[in-house]
Amino acid sequence: MSTRKRALALLSQGRSLNSVSNETGISRAALRSWKQRIEPLPRMRVQAEPCTRCQRSPEPPESASEYSYLLGLYLGDGCVSAHPRTGYYLRVACADAWPGLVDACEAAMCAVNPTRSAYRVQAQGCVSVVSYSQHWPCLFPQHGPGKKHERLIALDAWQQQIVDEHPWEFIRGLIHSDGCRITNWATRVVGGERKRYEYPRYFFTNTSADIIRLFTDVLDRVGVEWKSARHSRKAVNVSIARKASVALMDRHIGPKY
């Protein structure tokens, strides 16, 4: 208040805003505002949003199925980064080609985030779905320095319980991030004539051995047969091509949209 009163006293002497601003280092906008109201505006109390993981007796997130899906997205194309002052941002990169995926990602973030909020940041060829909260490290304890494939990725017991209860949502999140459903083709000699035939196939590609294991473990639990395909650089490709397993995946996952 003493600074405000001194600045207003200088202005009352008939000096210009520029002159007082140069002498005091206070912006002209602030000086104009103080001429209208010298008292500071009351500070709004920021109430910390509740978090089920921070309670005395921690509990899983309320929207367990949405959390299982978001966990898959995070392990594939997501990251948690600290805000310069306080709190954390969760970001998941989604290609522009899949607007339905962007909608599903945003809905899952809003359901899981204690603030119930998320927004989109457009970049060239992709959309980053972003959500701010103080509690993302509580909800995603896999967060840590460095790249995910260079550190241990393991689920906490409460996360594993959610994945066990909602395995298809977890698989969907992983497929929507680092997977795809394609139409594969091959040739076969039938009656002396080489013919081409096509069949659907799912792929999942990741460079983290831990994330690959999480994916294949849950496939085993739901009865989907898989095999390791050719490696691409340091990445591992998981292929799902057997007819019954593809039909099972189609029933619960389907292609991106």
Image (cartoon, rainbow, N blue to C red):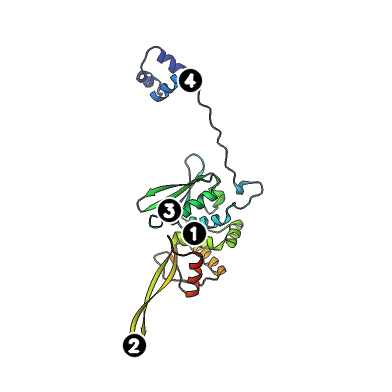
Q: Is residue 167 above or below residue 82?
A: below
Q: In this view, does 132 lie to the left or right of 25?
A: right
Mark 2 vs mark 1: which is more N-terminal?
Answer: 1
Cα distance in 3D space between marks 1 and 4: 53 Å
Where does label 2 land, which residue? 192
Mark 2 residue type: Gly
Q: Residue 64 carries which label?
A: none
**Residue at figure coordinates x 43%, y 23% from the top left:** 33
Q: Which mark is residue 38?
A: 4
Marks 3,4: beta carbons within 8 A: no
Residue 142 position within the rendered picture, expressed as x and y whole percent measured from the top left: 53, 54
Mark 1 residue type: Gly
Q: What element carries label 4?
A: loop
Around disc 2, counting alpha carbons within 10 Å, would you say few (fewer than 14), some (14 to 19), or many (20 or more)?
A: few
Residue 41 position within the rendered picture, expressed as x and y whole percent measured from the top left: 51, 26
Around disc 4, counting alpha carbons within 10 Å, would you say few (fewer than 14), some (14 to 19), or many (20 or more)?
A: some
Cα distance in 3D space between marks 3 and 2: 49 Å
